[in-house]
C-alpha cells in the first residue's frame, strides 16, 4: 500500500476511494447537470401542449406525453430543478436554525438551554406535514420559495438536538477553555473553535435535511398543496394520480417522477454513509 | 421517574397549546381572507345573498369579536368537542366526519408501524456483520427509505392491482357492499386493506433495518462485547446483549419517526382512496373545507402526542435506568 497523505488531503484521499460516496455522486451529479441544463434540453415551457396526448415513450419523446400532450421528459428535467431548489433552501434553512439553536443551547447551558430545549421538543413532536398542510392550505398563491421556507421552519428540531449534544461534549475541552481564558468572544469561540471541529458532522446533517425536505415537499405537492405554477416531481405525481394514469395504464407518467425523487434522496443517504466513513477513521475499510 | 413523566407531560401539554394556537391563528393572520374565498367559491351573484353569507361565515369564525375573546371561544368550543361543521359533507359536524374515518387510518397505521419496527429491527440485527446479507440488504434498505410513500403505493397499486389484478386499488371496501359483520365483508375489508398496509410497511421497514444494523455494529465494537468474547461467550450471547442495547435508541427513533409515518399513511390513503384521514384531507383541500382540515390537523396532533406518551411509558418499562433516576438516554 502506498503512503496515506495527511491533513486536508487525507479526507480527499479516502473520499476518492470510497465506493458509497462515489456511487452516490454517480447518481446525483448527472441529475444535477440535467436540472441545471433544463432550459437547454427541454426548451421553454414544460407545461406546453406539444404532442399527441397519452403517447408512450418514443425516440422523439423519451418519456412519452401526458393525457394533455405535455412532454413528460421536459416536465421531469424542470421538476428536478424545483426538487433541488426545495432541498437546498429548505434543508439549508433548517440547518441554519438547527445550528443556531444547537450551538446556543449546547454552549450556554443553564436556563437558555432549558428554554431552547423545550422549544425544540415542542416542534419535534408536532407532526411537520400536518402543520405544513394547514399553512399551505391557507396560502392563496403558493411558490417554491415559500414552500421551502415553511419546510425549513418545521424540520430543524432533530438537527438542533444532535448539534446541541455535540457542542455539549466539545465545550469543556481544553482548547475551548483556552480561548475563553484569552478573552475571545462567545460567538467567535463557537464559529472558530467549536464549529470547525464538527464541520463534517454539520455537513452530514445538512445532507440529511436536504433529503428530508425533498420528501416532505413531494408529499405536499402530491396532496395538491404544491406550487401554484410551474412543475415539480411531486406535482407530476399529483397530476398522474388525479387524471387516473394508473387506471389508464400510463406507467410512463408516474414512474419517472417517483424514480427521480428516490434516486436523489437515496443517493444522498448513501453518500452520507460514505462521508461518515471518510471523516471517521474508525469506520474506514482499508 | 415522576420528574421524567412530569417533563414529558409538560412538553406535550405545551405542544397541544401551540397546535391549537396555530390552528386558531392561521386563518386569522395569513394573507388572504378565508370568508372571501368561501364566498367566491359559492358563486352567488345577488348582493343581498352575498351579504347574508358573509355575515354567516363571519359569525361562524367569530371574526366580529375582539381577538382575545375569539381565542377564548375557540378553546371553549374545543372542549365541547365542537370543531365546526363540515362544508364538504354539510351539515355533518366535523367531529363526526373525523370519527368515522379514524378507524381506517388506525387500522393501517398501528399494524404497519409495529410490524415494520419489529421486523426491521430483527432483520437489521441479523444482517449486521454478515457480509453477504449486508451487501444486498443495505442498498435495498436505502432505496426503500428514500422512496416517497405515495410512489411505492402507486407502483404496488399498478403492479399488483391493475396489471396483475389481484388486489382492488380503491376504497375501503367494495362499492357493491354495505358495511356489516359478515365474513364476506370482513374479507373484503382485508383485501382492500392489504396493499396500503404493505406499502407503508415496506418503506418504514427499510429505515428500521438500516438503523438497527448500524446500531448493532456500534454495540459489537463496544468494550463490553470485547470483554464478553474474551471471556469466551458465544457469538449468539454477545449478539443478544448487543440487540438489547441497540433497541433503546430504536424506541426513541420510533417516537421521532411518528410524524413521518403518519404523513406517509396520509398520502398512501390518498393513492388508494382509502377512507381514512388522508382521504378527508384531500377532500377538505379540494372543497376548501377549512373546518374539516383544521379538525383533522388537531386530531393528528393529539394522536401523535398520545402515541409519544405511550412510547415514553414503554421506554421506562424497558430501560431500568429511567426508573431508578440514573437517567437513561431519553431522560
Image (cartoon, grey):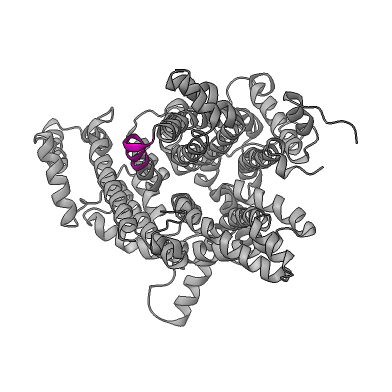
Magenta stretch: helix, strand or loop mostly = helix
Q: Quadrant of residue B56?
A: top left
Is B91 placed above or below A144 here?
Answer: below
Give coordinates of residue B71: x percent, y percent: 15, 41
Furthest toward the right, the residue is A1
Q: Nearer the viewer, residue B53 or A121?
A: A121
Q: Position of residue B206 (x, y in %)?
A: 62, 55
Tell me the residue at 51%/39% (across/down): A169
Left/right of residue A95 with respect to residue B275 in the rendered view: right
Closer-to-camera residue (A118/B175)? A118
A1 displayed left or right of B82: right
User: Residue A54's spot in the image, x, y percent?
Assistant: 63, 40
- Whether residue A199 is visible here, answered yes or no, is yes
**Residue depicted at 74% across the width and 56% down the height:** B134
Left or right of A180? Residue B62 is left
Image-quadrant location for residue B100: bottom left
Magenta span includes A110? yes
Magenta residue span: A109-118
In the image shown, does B278 or B216 lie closer to the viewer? B216
Question: Residue shown at 58%/26% (left/top)?
Answer: A196
Q: Is residue A233 in the magenta section?
A: no
Q: Where does the N terminus of chain B fall, quadrant-wise?
A: bottom left
Whether residue B172 can be seen here: no
Question: Does A120 sit left or right of A253 as displayed?
Answer: left
Amino acid at each position: 500500500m502506498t503512503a496515506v497523505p495527511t491533513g486536508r488531503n487525507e479526507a480527499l484521499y479516502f473520499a476518492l476511494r470510497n465506493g458509497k460516496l462515489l456511487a452516490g455522486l454517480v447518481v446525483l451529479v448527472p441529475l444535477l447537470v440535467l436540472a441545471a441544463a433544463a432550459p437547454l434540453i427541454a426548451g421553454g415551457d414544460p407545461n406546453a401542449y406539444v404532442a399527441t396526448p397519452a403517447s408512450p415513450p418514443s425516440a422523439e419523446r423519451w418519456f412519452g406525453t401526458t393525457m394533455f400532450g405535455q412532454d413528460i421528459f421536459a416536465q421531469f428535467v424542470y421538476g428536478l430543478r424545483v426538487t433541488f431548489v426545495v432541498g437546498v433552501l429548505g434543508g439549508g434553512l433548517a440547518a441554519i436554525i438547527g445550528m443556531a439553536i444547537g450551538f446556543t443551547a449546547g454552549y450556554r447551558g443553564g436556563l437558555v438551554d432549558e428554554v431552547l430545549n423545550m422549544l425544540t421538543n415542542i416542534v419535534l413532536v408536532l407532526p411537520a406535514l400536518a402543520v405544513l398542510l394547514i399553512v399551505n392550505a391557507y396560502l392563496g398563491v403558493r411558490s417554491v420559495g415559500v414552500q421551502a421556507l415553511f419546510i425549513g421552519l418545521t424540520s430543524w428540531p432533530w438537527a438542533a438536538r444532535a448539534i446541541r449534544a455535540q457542542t455539549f461534549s466539545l465545550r469543556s475541552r481544553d482548547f475551548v477553555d483556552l480561548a475563553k481564558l484569552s478573552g475571545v468572544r462567545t460567538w467567535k469561540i463557537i464559529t472558530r473553535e467549536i464549529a470547525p471541529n464538527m464541520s463534517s458532522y454539520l455537513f452530514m446533517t445538512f445532507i440529511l435535511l436536504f433529503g428530508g425536505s425533498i420528501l416532505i415537499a413531494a408529499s405536499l405537492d402530491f396532496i395538491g398543496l404544491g406550487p401554484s405554477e410551474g412543475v415539480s416531481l411531486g406535482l407530476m405525481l399529483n397530476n398522474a394520480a388525479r387524471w387516473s394514469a394508473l387506471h389508464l395504464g400510463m406507467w410512463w407518467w408516474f414512474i419517472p417522477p417517483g424514480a427521480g425523487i428516490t434516486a436523489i434522496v437515496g443517493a444522498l443517504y448513501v453518500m452520507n454513509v460514505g462521508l461518515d466513513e471518510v471523516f471517521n477513521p474508525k469506520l474506514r475499510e482499508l | 421517574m415522576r420528574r421524567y413523566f412530569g417533563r414529558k407531560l409538560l412538553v406535550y401539554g405545551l405542544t397541544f397549546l401551540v397546535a391549537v394556537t396555530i390552528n386558531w391563528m392561521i386563518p386569522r393572520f395569513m394573507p388572504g381572507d378565508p370568508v372571501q374565498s368561501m364566498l367566491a367559491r359559492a358563486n352567488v351573484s345577488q348582493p343581498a345573498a352575498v351579504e347574508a353569507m358573509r355575515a354567516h361565515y363571519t359569525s361562524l369564525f367569530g371574526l366580529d369579536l375582539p381577538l382575545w375573546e375569539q381565542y377564548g371561544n375557540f378553546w371553549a368550543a374545543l372542549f365541547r368537542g365542537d370543531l365546526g361543521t363540515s362544508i364538504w359533507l354539510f351539515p355533518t359536524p366535523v367531529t363526526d366526519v373525523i370519527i368515522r374515518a379514524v378507524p381506517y387510518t388506525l387500522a393501517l397505521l398501528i399494524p404497519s408501524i409495529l410490524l415494520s419496527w419489529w421486523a426491521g429491527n430483527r432483520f437489521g440485527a441479523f444482517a449486521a456483520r454478515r457480509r453477504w446479507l449486508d451487501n444486498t440488504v443495505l442498498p435495498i434498505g436505502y432505496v426503500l427509505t428514500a422512496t416517497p410513500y405515495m410512489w411505492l403505493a402507486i407502483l404496488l397499486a399498478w403492479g399488483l392491482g391493475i396489471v396483475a389484478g389481484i388486489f382492488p386499488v380503491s376504497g375501503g371496501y367494495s362499492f357493491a357492499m354495505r358495511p356489516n359483520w359478515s365474513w364476506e365483508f370482513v374479507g373484503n375489508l382485508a383485501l382492500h386493506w392489504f396493499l396500503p398496509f404493505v406499502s407503508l410497511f415496506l418503506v418504514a421497514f427499510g429505515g428500521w433495518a438500516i438503523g438497527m444494523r448500524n446500531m448493532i455494529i456500534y454495540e459489537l465494537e463496544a468494550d463490553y462485547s470485547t470483554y464478553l468474547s474474551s471471556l469466551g461467550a458465544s457469538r449468539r450471547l454477545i449478539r443478544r446483549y448487543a440487540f438489547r442495547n441497540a433497541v433503546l435508541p430504536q424506541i426513541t427513533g420510533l417516537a421521532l419517526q411518528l410524524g413521518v409515518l403518519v404523513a406517509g399513511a396520509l398520502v398512501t390513503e390518498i393513492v388508494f382512496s382509502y377512507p381514512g384521514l388522508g382521504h378527508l384531507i384531500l377532500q377538505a383541500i379540494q372543497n376548501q373545507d377549512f373546518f374539516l382540515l383544521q379538525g383533522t390537523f388537531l386530531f393528528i396532533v393529539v394522536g401523535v402526542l398520545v402515541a409519544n406518551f405511550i412510547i415514553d411509558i414503554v421506554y421506562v418499562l424497558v430501560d431500568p435506568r429511567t426508573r431508578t433516576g440514573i437517567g437513561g438516554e431519553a431522560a
